[in-house]
Amino acid sequence: MPVLYTADHEWIDTSDAAAATVGITVHAQDALGDVVFVDLPSVGATFNKGDVAGVVESVKAAADLYMPVGGEIVAVNEALRADPSLANTDPLANGWFFKVRLSDPTETGALMDQAAYDTLVKNA
Amino acid sequence: MADPDPTAALLKTPLHALNVELGAKLVPFAGYEMPVSYPRGILAEHRHCREAAGLFDVSHMGQLRLVGDDAAAALETLVPVDIGGLAEGKQRYAFFTNDAGGIRDDLMVTRRADHLFLIVNAACKGDDIAHLRATIASRCAIEPLPEQALLALQGPQAAAVIGRLAPALARLTFMSGAAATVAGIACFATRSGYTGEDGFEISVAARDAEALARALLAEPEVEPVGLGARDTLRLEAGLCLYGHDIDTTTTPVEAALTWAIQKVRRPGGGRASGYPGAAVIERQLAEGAARKRAGLIGLERAPVREGAAIVDAAGIAIGRVTSGTLGPSVGQPVALAYVPSASAVPGTLLDAEVRGKRQPMRVATLPFAPHHYFRG
């Protein structure tokens, strides 16, 4: 399962380019603290890589969610919208945020692999 | 070349080593390294405080004494509060005003046998001491207490814990204080706090602070709680945070704090006026003010935070949010905001603007979460 990472501590699972899953990393949820609200993009919306797709809010602050790649939103996690704490308790699986149909699969080439992301976190 | 330590300039409280040992997430606050949360996290710490007993390190705050027979009268020239009538062992909430009737800082004042004991906000303590020295130094001794730490034990089980360690303190009622020995350690405690819950604020010598904190943490009901939960607790309790809900541009009338101005200091009272901004405040006491602080509950799920505009139907800003979060006990977004006085009526529907979208809110009576003060 090719999971790649961004410098903003988001992960993207590109095993299905028609519906790549995006979420936040363990490091991200730990830095945020308790997540209390998520503002998810609308299904059908299209964004460019780097656009703000939504917001994840902890008790103390709101943080932007960025598009790791460009594309169309094909699904959002309603379970997360109903229970934002999933982003803390299960950030890599049931705490996923949205799925995107990649408009340009080559954009994934600019993302970090596991080893590179682990190094980033270690030096953070 | 190695990066300079970015925290080198931050001060540490006497509980710093303990906070590190407890795994606190430390952040800069008012020039100090302060625990924003411990490993359990803000929500769990908040709930623990409302269900059991939370221990806070608030040693960053300023503590000082005003000494001399004239101290109370002198302090009354700086605050629109009855200090002269404050009985020994009693505590009152007060605020220093400025010439425009705005608030320089809010503080707690306790009458002790031979002095007034003041607790002021950390970010203001330098300015407050300078203000006191510039105005009343000729009338009383102004003695900062930099070697005192301050702990707060708050929650429905706080009295049970204190009852075991210092039975005399457990007999105190809300807004009263006494010297006592807690776990063998001399301290001065008041039955008050900043959470809306029953609890105590305990002033203790810095050298004894860690031992006292450890003794309290050893009690089964007690867990450490950081400043993050302190903020959600006080906001649910409807309490102002200086620099956010009140500041030099807000009068006590606008801030809905007139309850703290006792009759004797109001027009017609025996010791009316005589503090900065009295003319402005007295006019507002008589006529009201154009804007008023109100509590708002969000009707949807998005938190509405400090800085958000309150907008009218046309999208024009008519007010401003000064504090806001998701209230962990209330289960909804809660906020404090200045709104037109006519709108500051419970039940009024208002919109806040968050990221370009309208968030519907309703004016609520404060506090959002009920207070549990022990009145005997």
Image: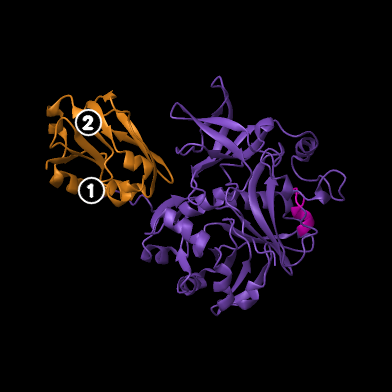
Place of residue A38 in the rendered image (x, y in percent of width and height, measured from the top left): 37, 39
Q: Are marks 2 and 1 in contact (CB under 8 Å)?
A: no
Does residue B71 appear in the picture of this structure? Answer: yes
Secondary element at tag 2: strand
Secondary element at tag 1: helix
The verdict on residue B221 being magenta is no
The verdict on residue B75 being magenta is yes
- Compared to residue B38, the image places residue A42 above or below, namely above
Residue placed furthest toward the bottom: B184
Determine the residue positioned at 75% across, 67% down.
B88
Q: Main secondary structure of the magenta part?
A: loop
Label annotation for residue A100:
2
Residue wearing tag 1: A121
Place of residue B108 in the rendered image (x, y in percent of width and height, measured from the top left): 66, 56
Chain corresponding to orange in the figure: A
Amino acid type, mark 2: Val
- Compared to residue B43, the image places residue A82 above or below, namely above
Q: What span is in magenta?
A: B72-81
Chain corresponding to purple in the figure: B
Q: Where is residue A24, by image quadrant?
A: top left
Chain letter for the residue marked with disc 2 in the picture: A
Q: Nearer the viewer, residue B353 or B133?
A: B353
Amino acid type, mark 1: Val
